[in-house]
Image: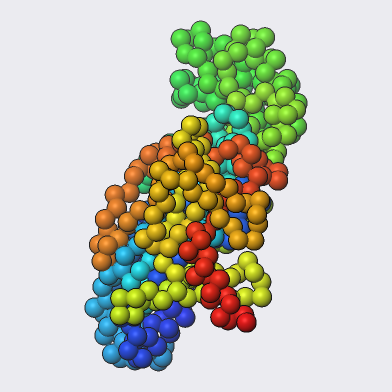
Amino acid sequence: MKRNLTLLTDFYELTMANGYFLSDRSEQIVYFDMFFRKIPDNGGFAVFAGLEQIIEYIKDLRFDEEDIEYLRFKNLFDEKFLDYLKNFKFTCDIYSVPEGTPVFPNEPLITVKGPVIQAQFIETMILLTANHQSLIATKANRIVRASEGRAVMEFGSRRAQGYDGAVYGARAAYIGGCSGTACTISDKLFGIPALGTMAHSWVQLFDSELEAFRTYAECYPDNCTLLVDTYNVLKSGVPNAITVFKELRESGHEPCGIRIDSGDIAYLSKEARKMLDAAGFSDCKITASNSLDEYIIKDLLTQGAAIDNFGVGERLVTSRSEPVFGGVYKLCAVERDGKIIPKIKLSENSAKITTPSYKELWRLFDKETGMAIADVVTLAGEIIDDTEPYMIFHPDYTYKRKLLKNFTAKKLQVPVFADGKCVYNSPSVSEIRDYCSKQISLIWDEVKRFESPQEYYVDLSEKLWNVKNELLSKYFL
């Protein structure tokens, strides 16, 4: 799937780049942060994803002759600038939290340091990629947690926003905890288990439902899951499935299960369970699908639905309840003569005021429980010494100040590019998924509530706050 995606960028990245070049600022060293302001669905945390695709994009960043000719045709760009693009070489440093990390608003997830043309140019692709996959990974994890240990399969390819939405949505859903996907190419590309059995059209094609089930069982005797709601779940679907299951057992094969895709799933699953158990198929699994999300799944389980697995489609792969992950990419510092000069973006909307300077992100863990206590954003080079007491600091809220004494501190960002060369080995998607599950297990349940989750501590170090406050005072007073 190699494509030259270099021009997948906002046009103003190019007009600014041309301007930087003409004003002799192209080599100005700058620092950008990618962060987000609000957790989707008012949740307690988000899941960061998409780093591997960002790395692939940057590794392949080049302006080919067609790109140059297109830009020349726009009659906006200086010819010397176009010559610069012909020989474009990426030389930035990039730091990022690993994929699968639970993250919180206003934390620097990706930090880019380098010449302004380069650092500015990759903004669109960083945001496009991280916003999309983080959104779907976050939604998937909510759905997986709602299922209370039952497998969740991603079934959304046909409802995704385009084929990349399907492919990378499946990847992100797997990172978030889904057990597999209906998207075959995602299995080929990433090793995500491809799952699926039959559609209603299979059943309709045959002269009878029983013939359809028998034929499928003959094709897949050791992997026989039957779709039972094409006509009538309880009057024909389950009884016909039981007939075929008995025939399978007599021939030495055990059936896998049934799937219900419509109707009152709570009621139908409970009745189907009774019928299967009475027929001696207590191990036969019941899968439910049909426009599910975390809230419907929680309601189904509260109602005692006898469901073993869930297939979730459009509401997962599009994150239908909140389809935008509001990640942004903001300049936070420039470097002159080796000195870092903090930069801030102000707004009458306080949520849009940025945190200035080159920063690092730390997570603090309780030594006794291993659970995450708080995240702290510091100036780069600051050290959180976990051998000494540390005050979680918030200047405006006394109740947020807390003295920690028995904790460990860990930097969350890791080097990804150094001088333009990739220094990071991307884990497999399965490794990212396992890492994600482990890290989320270290977040308190109160933070993981779906409704009114406890706010997790994310604070600035006192030194960083002083830098921010100084700039606020300079521009507001």
Which of these two is toward me, 460 or 31?
460
Q: Residue at x 34, y 76 (%)?
A: 339
Q: Answer with left or right where residue 415 lies relative to residue 43.
A: left
Q: Residue at x 30, y 91 (%)?
A: 79
Report the quarter where the C terminus lies: bottom right
Question: Where is residue 222 drawn, in percent x and y?
Answer: 45, 20
Q: Is residue 421 visible?
A: yes
Q: How many marks?
A: 0
- Give the answer, above or below, for where 477 lies relative to 325: below
Report the quarter where the N terminus lies: bottom left
Q: Residue at x 51, y 61 (%)?
A: 462
Question: Where is residue 217 drawn, in percent x and y?
Answer: 51, 22
Q: Answer with left or right where residue 472 lies relative to residue 333.
A: right
Which residue is the extreme one toward the front? 388
Q: Is residue 442 visible?
A: no
Question: Where is residue 438 drawn, in percent x and y?
Answer: 46, 36
- Give the answer, above or below, for where 152 lies relative to 110: above
The chosen color scheme is: rainbow
Q: Residue at x 46, y 9 (%)?
A: 252
Which of these two is toward me, 270 or 377?
377
Question: Where is residue 394 drawn, in percent x and y?
Answer: 59, 57
- Give the answer, above or below, for where 15 lies relative to 270: below
